[in-house]
């Protein structure tokens, strides 16, 4: 099938824990993200992950979010929107939705990055596909990875989560993501301005397009630029000459 792409650039180091997950599933008749033709059999699933923060400055929590059995059994669940439900906005820096490849990777809380949401500045956060694209998780779960930035060493229980809007049939295009990873990092000392560059070469269907670009570099970056070369033409996808960790 044709594909719609999301490009991500990131550089992270993590300490991974796991939170306790609760969820509720309900009818999606009122969902603004579903097409009228998709409402039959569609569902909205809301998850909350209860995490006792350890007081560490940087803490990552990976938690599998179980999908209804029919999703893996009959391939009848296609995600068209993800809403982030942030509890402590002063502690949650960002979260990712990961796609496991099997039940085994569901249990381990691992997977490839599919969606990223930034919790700062405080504002509603979500991802939603265009009317011609959807995402098939192809596994009995998805995984939420939450990054807590906690310089004051607070130890509350956080209940950050997500709300998935799930159609029962696919859209014409398949949503996919590609990660360009700048690791290992090796920066010479006493450099006022030093660039790390990664390039990915892709062979894609002519109908493929880039819908969204998400960049992430923790406390390391000072600038960030993303370009796409296609058919010999350079396209500027993202420019930030004054990087802010608080926004990424």
Image (cartoon, rainbow, N blue to C red):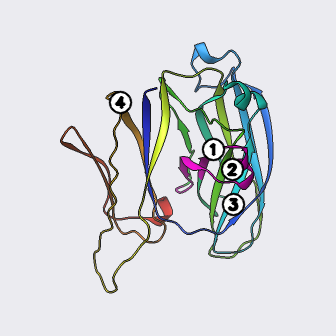
Circle 1 crowding by C-alpha within 10 Å: few under 14, some 14–19, many from 20? some
Upstream in the sequence, badge 1 or badge 4? 1
Q: Does 119 sit left or right of 240 as displayed? A: right
* Camera-side mark, 3 or 1: 1
Q: Which mark is residue 205?
A: 4
Q: Magenta span covers which residues?
A: 96-121
Residue 12: give x, y in percent of width and height.
52, 66
Which percent across, then down, holds residue 65?
Answer: 73, 45
> Is residue 77 part of the magenta span, yes or no?
no
Find the distance from the CA under tag 2 to the CA under tag 4: 29 Å
The residue carrying mark 3 is 61
Residue shown at 29% from the left, 74% from the top: 194
Q: Decide: marks 1, 4 in contact (CB < 8 A)?
A: no
**Residue displayed at 56% across by 33% down:** 135
Residue 123 location (% of width, % of height): 55, 48
Compute the Cα span from label 1 to label 4: 23 Å
Choose the circle earlier in sequence order: 2 or 3: 3
Residue 105 lies in the magenta-colored region: yes
Q: State the mark number for residue 101.
A: 1
Mark 1 to mark 2 CA distance (whole Å): 6 Å
Q: CA distance from mark 3 to mark 1?
A: 19 Å
- Establish if 134 lies above or below 243: above
Q: Is there CB contact under 8 Å for labels 1 and 2?
A: yes
- Residue pointed to by mark 2: 105
Q: Which comes before the other along the chain, label 3 or label 1?
A: 3
Q: At numbered mark 3, what does the secondary structure look like: helix, strand or loop?
A: strand
Crowding at label 3, few (<14), some or many (≥20) Cα neighbours within 10 Å?
Answer: many
Which residue appears farthest toward the left when viewing the image?
232
Q: In the figure, 82 relative to 186: above or below?
A: above
Which of marks 3 and 4 precedes in the sequence? 3
């Amino acid at each position: 099938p044709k594909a719609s792409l999301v490009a991500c650039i990131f550089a992270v180091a993590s300490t991974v824990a796991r939170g306790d997950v609760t969820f509720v599933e309900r009818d999606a008749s009122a969902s603004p993200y579903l097409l009228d033709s998709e409402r039959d059999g569609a569902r909205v699933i809301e998850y909350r992950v209860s995490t006792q923060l350890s007081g560490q400055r940087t803490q990552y929590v990976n938690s599998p979010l179980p999908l209804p059995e029919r999703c893996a059994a009959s391939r009848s669940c296609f995600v068209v929107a993800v809403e982030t439900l942030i509890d402590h906005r002063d502690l949650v820096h960002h979260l990712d939705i990961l796609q496991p490849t099997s039940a085994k990777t569901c249990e381990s809380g691992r997977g490839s990055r599919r969606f990223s949401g930034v919790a700062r500045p405080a504002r509603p956060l979500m991802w939603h596909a265009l009317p011609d694209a959807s995402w098939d998780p192809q596994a009995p779960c998805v995984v939420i990875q939450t990054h807590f930035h906690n310089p004051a060493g607070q130890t509350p229980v956080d209940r950050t989560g997500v709300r998935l809007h799930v159609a029962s049939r696919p859209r014409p295009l398949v949503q996919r993501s590609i990660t360009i990873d700048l690791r290992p990092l090796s920066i010479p000392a006493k450099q006022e301005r030093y660039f790390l560059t990664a390039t990915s070469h892709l062979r894609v269907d002519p109908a493929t397009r880039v819908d969204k670009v998400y960049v992430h570099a923790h406390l390391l970056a000072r600038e960030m630029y993303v370009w796409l070369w296609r058919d010999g033409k350079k396209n500027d996808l993202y420019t930030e000459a004054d990087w802010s960790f608080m926004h990424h």
